[in-house]
Image (spheres, rainbow, N blue to C red):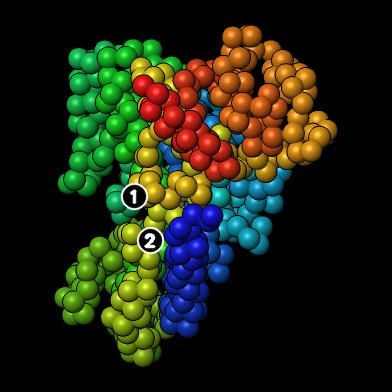
Amino acid sequence: MASSGSPEKHAGANEVSDRTAQVAARLKQIYKKYVYPVEKKYQYDFFFESPFLSDVEFDAKPQVLLVGQYSVGKTSFIRYLLGRDFPGQRIGPEPTTDRFTVLLNGPEERTIPGNALSVHPDLPFKGLERFGVNFLSRLEGSQLSSSVLRSVTLVDTPGILSGEKQRTNRGYDFTKVVAWFAEKADLIILLFDAHKLDISDELKGAIDVLKGHEDKIRCILNKADQIDRQQLMRVYGALLWSLGKTMSSPEVARVYVGSFWQEPLKSMDNAALFEMEERDLMKDLAVLPRQSAVRKINELVKRIRKVKTLAYIIGHLKSQMPTLMGKEKKQQKLIQDLPNVFRSILKKYNLAAGDFPEIQSFAAKLQEVKFQELAPLNQKYIDDLERVLTDEIPQLMSQLPSERDSPETLRNKMTSPENMPIPKAAGKFGKKDDNYEGNPFGYDETDQERYWALQDSADRLKNSYLQLGPEGGYLSTEKARDVLLRTGLEKDQLRQIWNLSDMDRDGLFDFDEYVVAMFLCDAVVQKGRPIPSELPATVVPPSKRELLSARKQSAFDGE
């Protein structure tokens, strides 16, 4: 008998996806019809150094940007999220990551050169061409199959160093590149090493260009398992103090504390704290797909406000120019008096100070243009932008999926065991098997009846299973034993894995049992995890759940 409610749940997930796609499509229409003409007219791309938006940027997955000094564990953190290595990975105590690496989901594992990445029609990285060939040679894509990367795109950055020499040797403006990625990112993660909290000049410069994106920033105090509880308290306070001096926001930055890699904790003093912190961080990551549409609306609103302000500024400068004589002199006077010009425009049109460009950089841009060639203020453009903000955007917001629509999209995309954002390493936090059973993503527990966390593994292992020559849909005892022996595990370990995998106790492996056995072997061999005393609910194939449930009930009744 089919499980009740499953069709409705599938329909709910499809409805959420359809509504999100409809919102993205409408955003494209709004931008092309109302915003782009104004941007082009008043040279928004030139004055704000922000290229015009393309369709692919509205369709792009959420992006997570990782920033930090060298050896803070950025690349290890990414590997921790993915649960596996990725093409082009470089990990070490010395500065190993010397390039920007964009991690993408794809059917095959490969690296993509930066020049190819920037011109790919389906990726939102065309704007990186403006940083030149020196930067593009330090940019690469890393493509691999991952359920995490189906939902988000991760961007690893070079380790930030100290000193003028390191900055000049890059051959491109590091902080401007970080600013470009920050504008596109949905979440910005700043990583710090618990053993070195000094904020170098280049890191401070990178944090400075994140101004305006404070709502996206999360901080991680990594490698915190290597110090005791008292030291951790002092280090945490010192980090908050340093961030308070560096970040201009009056709000305290959210700092997650833990050890974000796959090795066991060196000290168990703060294991419970690290586990709770990890779950909070992973929840932040897991909601990104749902919040992506909201973020795109929010970014477009911010852009519209800046475009409208630019139109008022350019229109005002144009109106102040004389008709015949003294144009150059008047232009220089207006540039020198730019703070007062901004102030008068702000008061006249009741604008927000945060929507104005930075004065010094804007003044430098004005030196490159002739004011008499600027476009005059067009009130129709302003009225159209106002109508978008007051009518179109609120209507779009009402079409977005609500909070209770999110469980499907979160779990379907971000909970494969080998690609779990939270590594299910039993024993990492000093507990028996609790971490296998956790629900860090906030999805509906009742939905587990049709969910199998090993579905991605099953898709990959189908061919290898068929090559073993199953008879009647089963691997013989001999063939199944040979497969397990080739893993090189101890006999006691293989016996435990066999007992867990052979769920119907017939001495044979069907395909589902084979997938479970391979998952357990991989967890022990590749990730060093202990074998659980019983299978987590999400690892049990749907075809076996009724059987195991009946067996548990029988054992309970026997007691």
**Pointer 2 residue:** 405
Left or right, 531 with reference to 345: right
- Is any part of residue 496 visible from this angle? yes
Quick check: marks 1 and 2 in contact, CB under 8 Å? no
**Pointer 1 residue:** 216
Q: Residue at x 69, y 40 (%)?
A: 460
- What kind of element bears circle 2? helix
Q: Look at the picture and state if 489 lies above or below 300.
A: above
- What kind of element bears circle 1? helix
Q: Earlier in the sequence, mark 1 or mark 2?
A: 1
Pick the front one: 260 or 330: 260
In the displayed orientation, state which residue is furthest to the front.
Answer: 558
Pick the front one: 196 or 208: 196
Q: Quadrant of residue 227?
A: top left
Q: Quadrant of residue 353?
A: bottom left
Q: Position of residue 539 (x, y in %)?
A: 52, 35
Q: Position of residue 473 (x, y in %)?
A: 75, 38
Q: Quadrant of residue 328?
A: bottom left
Pick the front one: 316 or 388: 388
Q: Position of residue 330 (x, y in %)?
A: 32, 77
Q: Look at the picture and state if 379 lies above or below 470.
A: below
